[in-house]
Image (cartoon, grey):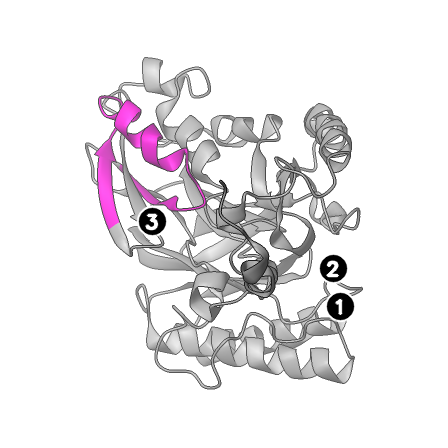
Amino acid sequence: MNITLSVLKADVGGFVGHSSSHPEVVETARQALGKAKKSGLLIDYHITICGDDLELIMTHQQGEESQAIHKLAWDTFVECTQVARRLKLHGAGQDLLAEAFSGNVKGMGPGVAEMQFQEREAETVLIFMADKTSAGAWNMPLYKIFADPFNTIGLVIAANMHNGFAFEVHDIKEHKKITFSAPEEIYDLLVFIGAPSRYAVKAVYHRDTKEIAAVSSTQRLALIAGRYVGKDDPVCIVRSQGQFPAVGEILEPFSMPGLVEGWMRGSHHGPLMPVAVRDANPSRFDGPPRVTCAGFQIAQGRLIGPRDMFDDPAFDPARRWTNDIAEYLRRHGPFEPHRLPLEEMEYTTMPQVAKKLEGRFLPLE
C-alpha cells in the first residue's frame, strides 16, 4: 500500500507563556482532523504537543505537498488560533505568517515533514518533535543514526545497510541543496552539517534501494518573516527496522544532550533534553529545549500507537546531564557561548541597538 505520512506543526498559542499547549486547542485540532478522516481525506491521524507547539500527524494517499492536506492543516491551525485568542493564550497564531492559504504551507510559517512510501510488511516509524530550538537541530542525530558505526552497529554488521545512506542537505539561507554519500563523503558532509544555523539535513535515503529513510522540517521562521517571531521547533520522521536502523539505534543519539540553538527568546545555546510528552513543558528560562518521540507501527495506513519512546528511565542520565549543562550555561548570562554569536542575532534587537550607536563608533588611531 502506497501511503503518505505528513507531520505539520505550528505554535498557535502558548499556555502559560511559551511553556505548553492548552487542552481546548488540542481538542479543537482533534475534532477538525476527525472530520477529515470521516470524509475519507485522511486514513488516520494523531494529535500531540511538544511545549507550545501543536503537532498534526496524518496518513493519507494524497501524496506529498497535497493542496488538500496542507489546506486541512492550515485551516486547523487557524481554527485553533481563534480558540487561543479567545483564551488569550500567549503569542496566539505566531507561526501563521500569511493571511490566507495559497496552496501550500511552505513559506507560510508552519513546519512540515512528509514522506511517501510503499508500506512494508512491518512498517516502523519514529516521529521526533522539538520545542525551543531551530531547524538544523536534527543534524547531529541524523548523522549518528545513518553514518556513525559507533552509534549504529547495523552499518557494520547488517548486509542491507552496509553500503550506507545518502544525505540531502539544504543551504537554508541561499536556498540550495546538495547530496552527500556516506560513508565515503562523510568528511565533506560534516563540513556543512556541522554548521546547523545555515545547513540542515532535509532527507536521508537508502543508497541501494533509494527509499526514503528520514525527512525533517527545515523552515526558518526568522528568514520567512524577516524578524524574530519564535523558534522553528522542527519535526523529523525516521523509518526504522529492516533495511533501516533499529529503533534503539535511532534513539541512541539522544542519550547525549547535544547543544542546539534556541531556548530563551531563541537567542541562546542549550542542551536538547529527551523527555516523555508529559514532561515537554519547558519552563526554566523557557527551556531547556525539549525533544519528544512518538513511535508507531503503520498498518494499511492506520497509526498503531503511539508509544512514548522517551518515557524510559534509560534516558534519566541524559536528563540529569541536560540539567547540569543548563546550569553551567546559564551562569554565562548574556555572554557567548550561551548567547548566540552576533551573526545569528540579526533578527533580534541587535540591529536596532547597532543603528542607534553607529555614530558613536570612532576609528582606531
Q: Earlier in the sequence, mark 2 or mark 3?
A: 2
Left or right: 214, with 184 as reference point = right
Report helix, strand or loop for mark 1: loop
Q: Marks 1 and 2: in contact by CB < 8 Å?
A: yes
Regarding residue 115, the answer to whether it shows in the image is yes
Foreground: disc 2 or disc 3: 2
Q: Tell me the quadrant of the picture where the N terminus can be found.
A: bottom left
Query: Mark 2: which amino acid?
Result: Ser
Q: Position of residue 13 (x, y in %)?
A: 68, 71
User: Dot 3 lies on which element?
Assistant: loop
**Residue underneath mark 3:** 119
Which residue is more in the foreground, 119 or 24? 24
Q: Which residue is mark 2?
A: 20
For the point 41% across and 54% down, the residue is 218
Under mark 1, the amino acid is His
At a point 61% along the width and 73% down the height, the residue shown is 29
Magenta region: which residues? 177-205
Picture layout, residue 4 above or below residue 85:
above
On screen, residue 341 above or below 313: below
Residue 180 falls inside the magenta stretch:
yes
Q: Position of residue 165 (x, y in %)?
A: 28, 31
Quadrant of res 310 = top right
Considering depth in this image, is 166 or 349 the residue closer to the camera?
A: 349
Tag on residue 22? 1
- Real-space Cα separation, disc 2 to disc 1, in angstroms: 7 Å
| Residue 123 visible at all | no
Q: Amino acid at mark 3?
A: Glu
